[in-house]
Image (spheres, coloured by chain):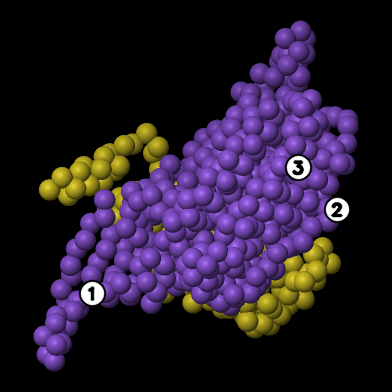
């Protein structure tokens, strides 16, 4: 429910017309479908124009950073799903890469695992962008685009389900590689997706890209300049939509992204429409990456040969004493990275996600810090909507593509 | 990485003598320990003169009973480059005392530091002097403890209970 309150200190009486005007405070959220979760924004309105917007966050705070200080490195993985739950696989892979960097075992990860992770990462990106575009369109009244997007998202969830058994909260790769080899029908399913997805993308494209109403609602709305975007620390489509070609996949490549042929789409207007165009083009580029990945998916081992880190195969655990002991030690105590600290960034669908891990030489992280893209991107909202209409706030929140699970952590 | 960090340290040290206390290399990442009092000057210099226009992250670590000073405020600054090896990420650390923890804010250098500093204040109780709006951000406004401090008792529910009861009183009324 939206609650309307009047504040009178800024009341102004116009003697000519006899009309009293005052700034109105409108509370939007925390339960509001267009806030994509539990975001609360207090809006100060002059008529329908936003004078000031103050976001309040923290309604979904679970203290993930604190929780992770009390469990082993491997146990932290499921918590990372629950941050950006629209692209949990990307969070998972980002975390795994950070721990691998902390252990110094990046070079031991087999190519098969890396390529599979790239494919899954890009599927996660498409999945997240589909929700981003779909809900942004839905908030602005375009129901059909939303349905097309969500139909296609199911296909990605089906692929994830065959790979790891879960659809939303994947908790999938492990430190050192994959927990199991990819299923036999993985390649077929991904190829099928590559075949059918461009048609849906074209459909969404034709529904929105040149749609008069969509353009009217998003073009020139929620604008942010390149300088402001960098200053505020925006990343992802929010930054590239303002013309800054920064993408972690190109700037600080991980998982061998430097060997893939793809481009970083950039739009220059800095408005909601630019961000939409960036997301659309990014999905096409992701398809290119997935295609290259699936064509070059090597055979061979799927996990690193590192007995100190990787769990033994299940069958060996059941049949061999040594493997059983290893299994117990790894589950109870976890592996122990040498004391030190690393930061690792990945290009999540919504922007730069980086983990900062400090090890004190025990099996539990001394400190785990998550820099979520949504948290930082959300700061741009007051700038974007100032002086705009109330309806543009909805477009701005949608175009920032935030997810509250990651803002609040 | 081909970037010459030593000349960067020299440039910073010539502008702020003695500001860089130590340089640490680990797993291909460079960390500079910065004198707490010159942190905002060094950050400003890095941004204006050396092109580190992007603040990637700002956080803190509590080293209770491990180190003195107790806290470290950690900055990750980034310089964009057209080529891969021109993208430089640098970690800065400033040590902050355990009693009355306080450090200069960098919000006037990078506006994006606003919420990040609020979060550090919320979680560690480190005060950023010069911050325009230093309030709690994730925890309730009237919450007293600082959860990410190492001496925070995770089993103690009293503080949360007080906040919750107040919210119930105010909401129900």
Chain designation of label 3: A
- Per the image, label 2 sits on a secondary structure element best described as helix
Which shade is chain B?
Answer: yellow
| CA neighbours of label 3 inside 10 A, class few (<14), some (14 to 19), many (20+) | few
Chain designation of label 2: A
- Can residue B167 be seen? yes
Asked if the residue at tag 1 contacts the one at tag 3, i.e. Cβ–Cβ closer than 8 Å, the answer is no
Q: Residue at x 41, y 61 (%)?
A: A394
Q: Is residue B59 above or below residue A165?
A: below
Q: Residue at x 33, y 36 (%)?
A: B156
Q: Splitting the image into 4 quarters, where does residue A271 fall?
A: bottom right
> Label 1 belongs to which residue?
A23
Distance between mark 3 and mark 1 Cα atoms: 54 Å
Chain designation of label 1: A
* Precedes in sequence: disc 1 or disc 2: 1
Q: Which mark is residue A195?
A: 3
Q: Residue at x 66, y 18 (%)?
A: A328
Asked if the residue at tag 2 contacts the one at tag 1, i.e. Cβ–Cβ closer than 8 Å, the answer is no
User: Which residue, as the protein is rendered here, is positioned at the far bottom?
Assistant: A16
Q: Which of the two discs, 2 and 3, sits closer to the camera? A: 3
Q: Residue at x 21, y 61 (%)?
A: A4
* Precedes in sequence: disc 2 or disc 3: 3
Q: Which mark is residue A324?
A: none
* Precedes in sequence: disc 3 or disc 1: 1
Residue A176 x/y as whole percent: 75, 34
Check if mark 3 and mark 1 are on a common chain.
yes
- Per the image, label 3 sits on a secondary structure element best described as helix
Q: Splitting the image into 4 quarters, where does residue A315 fall?
A: top right
């Amino acid at each position: 429910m939206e609650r309307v309150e009047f504040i009178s200190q800024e009341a102004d009486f116009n003697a000519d017309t006899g009309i009293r005007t005052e700034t109105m405070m409108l509370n939007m959220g925390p339960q509001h479908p267009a806030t994509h979760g539990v975001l609360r924004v207090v809006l100060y309105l002059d008529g329908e124009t936003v004078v000031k917007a103050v976001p309040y966050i923290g309604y979904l705070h679970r203290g993930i950073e604190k929780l992770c200080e009390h469990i082993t490195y491997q146990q932290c993985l499921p918590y990372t799903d629950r941050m950006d739950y629209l692209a949990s696989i990307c969070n998972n892979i980002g975390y795994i890469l950070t721990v691998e960097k902390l252990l110094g075992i990046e070079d031991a990860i087999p190519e098969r695992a890396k390529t599979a992770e790239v494919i899954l990462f890009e599927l996660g990106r498409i999945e997240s962008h589909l929700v981003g575009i779909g809900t942004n369109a839905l908030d602005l009244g375009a129901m059909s685009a939303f349905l097309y997007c969500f139909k296609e998202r199911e296909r990605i969830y089906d692929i994830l389900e065959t790979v790891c058994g879960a659809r939303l909260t994947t908790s999938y790769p492990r430190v050192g590689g994959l927990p199991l080899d990819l299923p036999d029908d993985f390649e077929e399913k991904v190829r099928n997706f590559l075949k059918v997805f461009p048609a849906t993308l074209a459909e969404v494209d034709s529904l929105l890209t040149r749609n008069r109403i969509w353009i009217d609602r998003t073009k020139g709305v929620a604008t942010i300049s390149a300088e402001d975007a960098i200053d505020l620390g925006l990343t992802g489509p929010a930054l590239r939509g303002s013309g800054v070609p920064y993408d972690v996949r190109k700037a600080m490549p991980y998982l061998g992204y430097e060997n893939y042929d793809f481009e970083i789409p950039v739009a220059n207007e800095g408005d909601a429409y630019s961000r939409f165009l960036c997301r659309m083009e990014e999905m096409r580029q992701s398809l290119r990456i997935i295609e290259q990945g699936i064509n070059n998916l090597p055979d061979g081992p799927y996990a690193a040969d590192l007995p100190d880190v990787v769990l033994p195969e299940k069958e060996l655990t059941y049949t061999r004493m040594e493997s059983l002991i290893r299994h117990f030690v790894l589950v109870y105590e976890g592996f122990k990275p040498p004391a030190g600290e690393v930061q690792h960034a990945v290009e999540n669908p919504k922007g730069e996600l980086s983990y900062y891990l400090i090890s004190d030489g025990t099996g539990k992280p001394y400190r785990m810090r998550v820099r979520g893209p949504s948290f930082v991107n959300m700061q741009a909202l007051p700038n974007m909507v100032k002086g705009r209409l109330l309806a543009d706030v909805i477009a701005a929140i949608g175009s920032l593509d935030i997810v509250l699970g990651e803002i609040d952590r | 990485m081909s970037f010459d960090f030593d000349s960067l340290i020299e440039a910073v040290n010539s502008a702020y003598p003695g500001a860089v206390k130590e340089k640490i290399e680990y797993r291909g990442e460079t960390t500079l320990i910065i004198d707490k009092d010159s942190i905002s000057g060094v950050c400003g210099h890095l941004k204006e003169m050396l092109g580190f226009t992007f603040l990637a992250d700002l956080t803190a670590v509590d080293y209770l009973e491990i180190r003195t000073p107790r806290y470290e405020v950690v900055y990750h600054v980034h310089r964009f480059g057209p080529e891969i090896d021109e993208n430089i990420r640098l970690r800065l650390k400033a040590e902050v005392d355990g009693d009355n923890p306080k450090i200069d804010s960098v919000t006037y250098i990078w506006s994006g530091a606003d919420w990040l500093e609020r979060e550090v204040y919320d979680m560690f109780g480190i005060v950023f002097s010069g911050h325009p709006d230093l309030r709690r951000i994730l925890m309730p406004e009237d919450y007293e403890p600082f959860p990410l401090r190492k001496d925070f008792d995770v089993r103690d529910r009293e503080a949360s209970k007080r906040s919750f009861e107040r919210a119930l009183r105010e909401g129900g009324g």
